[in-house]
Image: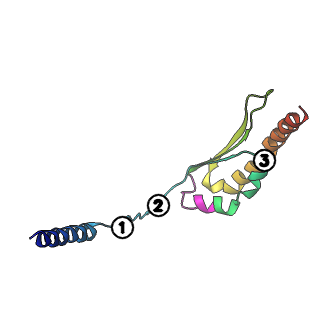
């Protein structure tokens, strides 16, 4: 009798599992038109900015309308020391998607500037 009850329970459990699998749908996302208006790059050393693939950045915003605003933010976090509590250098570049080449040009120029500042801080840290 116990054997029959176990077989029935096993059969019912199997049926319930199969029924749940039949109702489950895979998660799917379909975007007709997606827009990216803001990207932030945070690094701990200026050298990490060299890994930015600017072609990928352009591809990310290519679905935007030409008049949509795009904002790129870049930040360097300098570690704490006994003389400097913490130094974060950042800047933002904002323009419309149509001017993406100009946004990238300004971004590269800004990266050079904050990289110099961060390197100066690191030099001071190493001297102390």
Q: Nearer the viewer, mark 2 or mark 1?
A: 1
**Element type at mark 1:** loop
Q: Nearer the viewer, mark 2 or mark 3?
A: 3
Q: What mark, if any, has residue 26 been given in the picture?
A: 1
**Separation (CA) of disc 1 from disc 3:** 42 Å
Using a 10 Å C-alpha cutoff, classify the residue at mark 3 as few (fewer than 14 neighbours), some (14 to 19) or many (20 or more).
many
**Element type at mark 3:** helix
Range of residues picked out in magenta: 58-67
**Separation (CA) of disc 2 from disc 1:** 22 Å
Image location of residue 119, percent across then percent down: 84, 41
Q: Quadrant of the C terminus?
A: top right
Image location of residue 63, percent across then percent down: 54, 61
Using a 10 Å C-alpha cutoff, classify the residue at mark 2 as few (fewer than 14 neighbours), some (14 to 19) or many (20 or more).
few
Q: What mark, if any, has residue 3 been given in the picture?
A: none
Find out whether the residues at labels 2 and 1 contact each other: C-beta distance under 8 Å.
Answer: no
Q: Main secondary structure of the magenta part?
A: loop
Q: Quadrant of the N terminus?
A: bottom left
Q: What mark, if any, has residue 33 been given in the picture?
A: 2
| Residue picked out by circle 3 | 46
Identify the mark nearer the N-term, 2 or 1: 1
* Picture residue at 87% right of the left edge, 34% below the top: 124
Q: Of all residues shown, which one is farthest toward the right? A: 127
**How many marks on residues?**
3
């Amino acid at each position: 009798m116990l054997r029959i009850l176990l077989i029935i329970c096993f059969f019912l459990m199997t049926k319930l599992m199969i029924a749940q699998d039949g109702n489950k749908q895979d998660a799917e996302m379909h975007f007709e038109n997606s827009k990216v208006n803001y990207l932030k790059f945070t690094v701990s050393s200026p050298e990490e900015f060299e890994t930015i693939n600017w072609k990928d950045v352009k591809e990310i915003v290519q679905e935007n309308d030409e008049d949509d605003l795009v904002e790129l933010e870049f930040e360097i976090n300098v570690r704490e020391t006994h003389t400097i509590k913490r130094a974060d250098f950042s800047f933002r570049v904002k323009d419309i998607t149509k001017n993406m080449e100009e946004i990238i040009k300004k971004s590269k120029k800004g990266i050079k500037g904050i990289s110099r500042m961060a390197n100066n801080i690191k030099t001071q840290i190493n001297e102390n």
